[in-house]
């Protein structure tokens, strides 16, 4: 491989578009992050217009070009990652017909219930029972509530694949993102005609299926003129954000496991074969590499609950506030927090669930609430481990990636709640953009997965604190009882 080869990863996240260029030695050359806003037109709804992603990508590329002159012209190949499950509907003019309905949108709960009743083996075919956030129930919701939109739909895409079309003119996706649509036959790695027809679609409306390192198209002259990217360079299929993070951290072999802490959070376990476990609401999906799958507990509320709490208590600097909480050296907050601001998937499948602070008295302050939010997020990971363990063992040591893993106090709480050491790797916060840059490299260099998808250098290992572990273990039953008690009230 040429020493001057550069690889670009683009990640269409929920809160931001992130771009990263790495060189042949995987050293960061340039990067940018452009924030995204989310619209909430009704309670429990969550939307973004696809045009905003394209604008943010152009801005991010321009920022990198300004910071590192000539960097875009040296890019050899591009990988795409993105938030999963979003419904992007394209009309006959190849334009979006409406804002995208995102992964954390709960409007299609009734449609999910109906799909599960109509197709009792859905969870075995698609890897998990239907839940409101997946693409398939959203299409069913549109069939009932916006039939004119669905009738006008030429193509149905996932978020990152709209960007692919603008860059290459091609309609395609990868196996992992397709898995998150709930329309994929996971074991056979092809679209499931019964599932597609059940929600009112035709196979011809869905994108071409490719493995993550496959070349999906090349930068067109029009896209090159707009972005500054070299015309003709390949764009690979890429990965949904969960699998992309796994590739970035080297979680590509059977038994590799990690926690991802971003806007949402996941507990991800690579498997050598397809192992569905629908009863535990565990997602069993195709990985973005051939002949690999994964099991995942998916929680809708990750590090974002800490940022939300900081905003509520009026703290402008979340990192400084977490440092202040750590300095108080309290094993556990006096308050218990249910962090279900966006509902919850694993293990509850409850889009109506909401956040609750419990146990407040006149002495509670903002730092108590912030500590409680960290602990509530950590408890969701405890439930995640329990869900995965219904199908088999979870490794005794877990890795952690994502922006939420940067803070030591947060990871000490997570390690103590889980009773497991947590490994952090150098560059682990680079996330999905780094993972799909690796896929781009695989596409053009002839290297093997074992050559490229190695684990990064170990940064540190965070061990459980005995006092905090005991306090959190004692609080966990109350946390779980609160949800069980309040569940009938959330829908009211």
Image (tube, grey):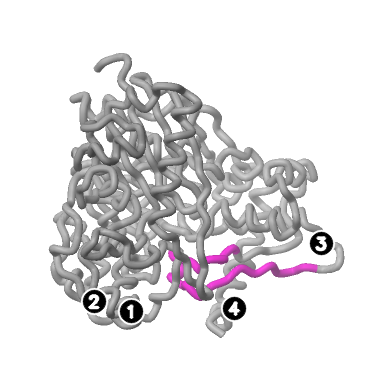
Mark linked to residue 146: 1
Residue 351 magenta? yes
Of callouts 2 and 1, the N-terminal one = 2
Which residue has dot 3 on it? 364
> Of tags 3 and 1, which is closer to the observer?
1
Q: Residue at x 22, y 34 (%)?
A: 234
The reply to whether dot 2 and dot 1 touch (C-beta < 8 Å) is no
Observer-nearest of 200 and 327 = 200
Disc 2 is placed on an element classified as loop
Q: Main secondary structure of the magenta part?
A: loop
Q: Nearer the viewer, mark 2 or mark 1?
A: 1
Q: Position of residue 253 (x, y in %)?
A: 29, 38
Spatial separation of the CA atoms under disc 3 and disc 2: 48 Å
Q: Quadrant of residue 225?
A: top left
As helix, strand or loop, the secondary structure at mark 3 comes to: loop
What residue is shown with label 2? 120
Tag 1 secondary structure: loop
**200 or 112, which lies in front?**
200
> Going by the image, does 153 lie left or right of 321?
left
In the image, the segment drawn in magenta is 339-360
Kindly report the distance in space between the C-alpha atoms of the residues bearing marks 2 and 1: 26 Å
Query: Do callouts 1 and 4 mark residues in contact (Cβ within 8 Å)?
Result: no
Q: Earlier in the sequence, mark 3 or mark 2?
A: 2
Q: Residues within 10 Å of mark 4 (few under 14, many from 20)?
A: few
Residue shown at the point (25%, 65%) measured from the top left: 91
Q: Nearer the viewer, mark 1 or mark 4?
A: 1
Q: Position of residue 456 (x, y in %)?
A: 42, 28
Q: Which residue is mark 4?
A: 486
Q: Is residue 93 visible?
A: yes
Picture quarter with the C terminus: bottom right
**Nearer the N terminus, badge 4 or badge 2?**
2
């Amino acid at each position: 491989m040429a020493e001057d080869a550069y690889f670009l990863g683009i990640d269409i996240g929920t809160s931001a578009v992130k771009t990263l260029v790495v060189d042949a030695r995987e050293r960061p050359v340039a990067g940018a992050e452009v924030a995204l806003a989310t619209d909430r037109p009704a309670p429990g709804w969550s939307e973004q217009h696809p045009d905003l992603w394209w604008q943010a990508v152009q801005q991010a590329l321009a920022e990198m070009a300004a910071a590192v002159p000539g960097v875009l012209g040296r890019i050899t190949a591009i990988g795409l990652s993105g938030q999963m499950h979003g419904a992007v509907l394209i009309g006959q003019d190849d334009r979006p017909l409406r804002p995208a309905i995102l992964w954390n949108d709960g409007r299609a709960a009734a449609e999910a219930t109906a799909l599960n009743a109509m197709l009792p083996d859905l969870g075995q075919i698609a890897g998990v029972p239907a839940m409101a956030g997946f693409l398939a129930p959203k299409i069913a919701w549109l069939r009932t509530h916006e039939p004119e939109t669905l009738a006008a739909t030429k193509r149905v895409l996932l978020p990152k694949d709209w960007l692919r079309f603008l860059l290459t003119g091609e309609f395609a996706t990868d196996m992992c993102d397709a898995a998150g649509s709930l329309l994929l036959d996971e074991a056979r790695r092809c679209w499931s005609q019964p599932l597609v027809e059940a929600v009112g679609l035709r196979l011809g409306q869905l994108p071409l299926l490719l493995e993550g390192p496959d070349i999906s198209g090349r930068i067109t002259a029009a896209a090159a003129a707009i972005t500054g990217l070299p015309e003709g360079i390949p764009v690979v299929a890429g990965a949904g954000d969960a699998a992309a993070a796994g590739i970035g951290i080297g979680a590509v072999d059977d038994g590799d496991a990690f926690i991802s802490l971003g806007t949402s959070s996941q507990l991800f376990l690579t498997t050598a074969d397809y192992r569905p476990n629908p009863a535990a609401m565990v997602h069993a999906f195709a990985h973005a590499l051939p002949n690999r799958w994964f099991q995942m507990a998916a929680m809708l509320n990750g590090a974002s609950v800490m940022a939300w709490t900081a905003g509520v208590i009026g703290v402008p600097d979340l990192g400084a506030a977490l440092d202040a909480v750590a300095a108080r050296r309290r094993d556990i907050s006096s308050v218990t927090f249910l962090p279900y601001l966006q509902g919850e998937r694993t293990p509850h499948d409850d889009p109506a669930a909401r956040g609750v602070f419990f146990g407040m008295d006149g002495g509670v302050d903002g730092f108590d609430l912030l500590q409680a939010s960290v602990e509530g997020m950590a408890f969701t990971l405890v439930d995640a481990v329990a869900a995965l363990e219904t199908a088999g063992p979870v490794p005794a040591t877990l890795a952690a990636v994502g922006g939420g893993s940067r803070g030591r106090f947060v990871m000490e709480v997570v390690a103590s709640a889980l009773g497991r050491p947590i490994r952090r790797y150098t560059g682990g916060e680079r996330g999905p953009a780094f993972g799909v840059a690796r896929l781009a490299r695989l596409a053009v260099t002839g290297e093997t997965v074992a050559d490229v998808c190695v684990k990064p250098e170990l940064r540190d290992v965070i061990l459980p604190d005995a006092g905090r572990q005991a306090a959190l273990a004692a609080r966990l039953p109350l946390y779980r009882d609160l949800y069980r008690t309040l569940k009938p009230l959330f829908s009211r």
